[in-house]
Image (cartoon, rainbow, N blue to C red):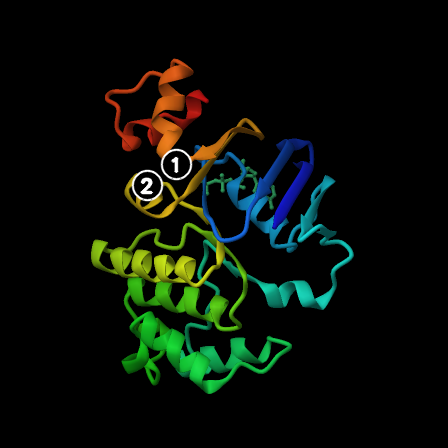
Amino acid sequence: MIELRNIKKKYKQKEVLNGVSLNISSGVIVGLVGPNGAGKSTLMKIIANILKPSSGEVFFHGQSVKEIKKGFYEKIGYVPQDLALYHTLSVADNIAFWSTLSATKISDDKINEIITTVGLAEMLPVKVEQLSGGMKRKLNIAVALMHNPELIIMDEPTVGIDIQSKLEIITFIQKLKNEGKTIIYSSHDAYEVEKLCDEIVILNGGQIKYHGLQKELVNAAREKGHLMDDDSFTAVLSKLGQW
Ligand SMILES: Nc1ncnc2c1ncn2[C@@H]1O[C@H](COP(=O)(O)OP(=O)(O)OP(=O)(O)O)[C@@H](O)[C@H]1O
């Protein structure tokens, strides 16, 4: 579904991505992991076509995203790391605003469905600034997904929230996968990456150091001789700088 060919990205003189090539199949959840500053957010923005690479190309269903115009943004949902919400507006007004950005009309049924699924139906009249951190995160996800995209890019969507909200969001993402969505998911949380992701991509030093099944990651780390405190998934994710 998504193919990255030799993506490079420099911010001024600083090289962040240095030749990233990757294929992502439909219907999988891919965990994008790596140490702080590895370039995960940069790569996700490039896939979402909201940031241009310095060189290289992204293909969506075989077509370069440079050539796909408006239709591309209808097919993807991008959940940014920073909240993209109007804090002085109500939940309902945020939904109304974001739904107008979609080229195709989003039905009230679809909006109600997603707001109910993320547990915010009772909060529609409440201003965003009065929501808890977890509720804001859920709304941030909901507004990015109202148009029912087939590819979902989520950049640390659960950062800074309590475990209960985190579990609810995990359940919601599993539901999206069961609906056949393709999801690229960045997180530093070993628990949720292990629970959610079918495949793992490790980004470090501007390059992909591993792309394979999540279940095989611990074995791969052992075979590569990475030092781990134990054989847990958490131990591998805590040492990504070694890759
Ligand atoms: N707009 C920008 N201008 C200059 N440098 C940038 C810009 N955006 C990111 N960087 C730098 O690029 C590098 C990669 O940043 P990026 O946010 O993509 O990493 P990340 O893997 O998502 O990090 P984290 O896990 O901490 O969120 C960092 O060194 C960052 O400081």
Place residue 226 in its image quadrant. Answer: top left
Dot 1: element: helix
Q: Residue furthest left?
A: 164
Specify whether 79 is left or right of 90: right
Q: Residues within 10 Å of mark 2 (few under 14, many from 20)?
A: some
Residue at numbered disc 1: 214
Which labelled disc corresponds to residue 194? 2
Q: Residue at x 34, y 85 (%)?
A: 125
Q: Please name whichever residue, 26 or 133, is drawn nearer the observer in this view of the structure.
A: 26
Dot 2: element: helix
Residue 78 at x, y percent in the picture: 53, 59
Above or below, 203 relative to 155 = above
Q: Residue furthest top?
A: 225
Residue 189 at x, y percent in the picture: 32, 42
Q: Residue furthest right?
A: 67
Looking at the rendered structure, the kind of residue marked 2 is Glu
Looking at the rendered structure, the kind of residue marked 1 is Gln
Q: Residue at x 61, y 54 (%)?
A: 48
